[in-house]
Image (cartoon, rainbow, N blue to C red):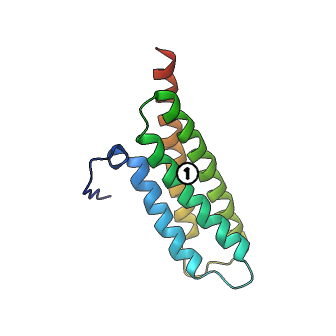
């Protein structure tokens, strides 16, 4: 994964951010092709992917370890919600021509990275 950054914000240094951005872009592309009549599911998967990326960004740019961990916990929940929506899309065979399984693996990877970030910042919080 290539990380091109024109800013020095902390989130640009996190692999979790870049993977979440990749997930968000993939979900946006997939949702553009979802069949009509499923606006609620389309909206849900898009919002969950975007919220994952945005909460990682917000957490990375906070100062206090407690604040960082709290945002990463929210991001992990949103990532799980994104995965559940993707699973529903997959089970309903709504995404012909898209590799939903690849997006679900990416969501799992983002979730794992967030677990590590949560543990790291909760540990830092406890050492003060």
Point out the residue furthest to the front here. Answer: 63
Q: In this view, does 122 lie to the left or right of 80?
A: left
Which quadrant of the figure has residue 43?
bottom right
Q: What residue lies at 47% left-to-right and 55% top-to-bottom?
A: 20
**Residue 34: x %, y % from top left:** 63, 80
User: Where's the N terminus, which quadrant?
Assistant: bottom left
**Residue 44: x %, y % from top left:** 67, 65
Using the image as rendered, state which of residue 96 and residue 25 is in the foreground.
25
Q: What residue lies at 61% left-to-right and 59% top-to-bottom?
A: 48
Which quadrant of the figure has residue 10?
top left
Task: Give the residue at mark 1.
Answer: 108
Q: How many labels does the image show?
A: 1
**Residue 38: x %, y % from top left:** 73, 78
Q: What residue lies at 44% left-to-right and 62% top-to-bottom?
A: 22
Reply above or below: 36 against 54.
Answer: below
Using the image as rendered, state which of residue 10 and residue 2 is in the foreground.
10
Point out the residue furthest to the bottom here. Answer: 36
Q: What residue lies at 66% left-to-right and 72% top-to-bottom?
A: 42
Using the image as rendered, state which of residue 53 and residue 119 is in the foreground.
53
Which quadrant of the figure has residue 2?
bottom left
Q: What element carries label 1?
A: helix
Circle 1 packing at 10 Å, graded few (<14), some (14-19), many (20+), is some
**Residue 117: x %, y % from top left:** 47, 36
């Amino acid at each position: 994964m290539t990380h091109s950054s024109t800013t020095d914000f902390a989130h640009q240094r996190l692999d979790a951010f870049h993977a979440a951005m990749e997930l968000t872009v993939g979900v946006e592309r997939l949702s553009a092709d979802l069949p009509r009549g499923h606006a609620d599911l389309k909206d849900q998967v898009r919002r969950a992917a975007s919220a994952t990326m945005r909460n990682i960004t917000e957490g990375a740019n906070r100062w206090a370890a407690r604040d960082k961990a709290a945002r990463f916990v929210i991001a992990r929940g949103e990532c799980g919600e994104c995965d559940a929506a993707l699973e529903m899309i997959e089970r309903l065979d709504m995404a012909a021509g898209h590799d939903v399984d690849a997006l679900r693996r990416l969501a799992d990877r983002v979730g794992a990275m967030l677990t590590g970030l949560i543990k790291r910042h909760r540990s830092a919080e406890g050492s003060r």
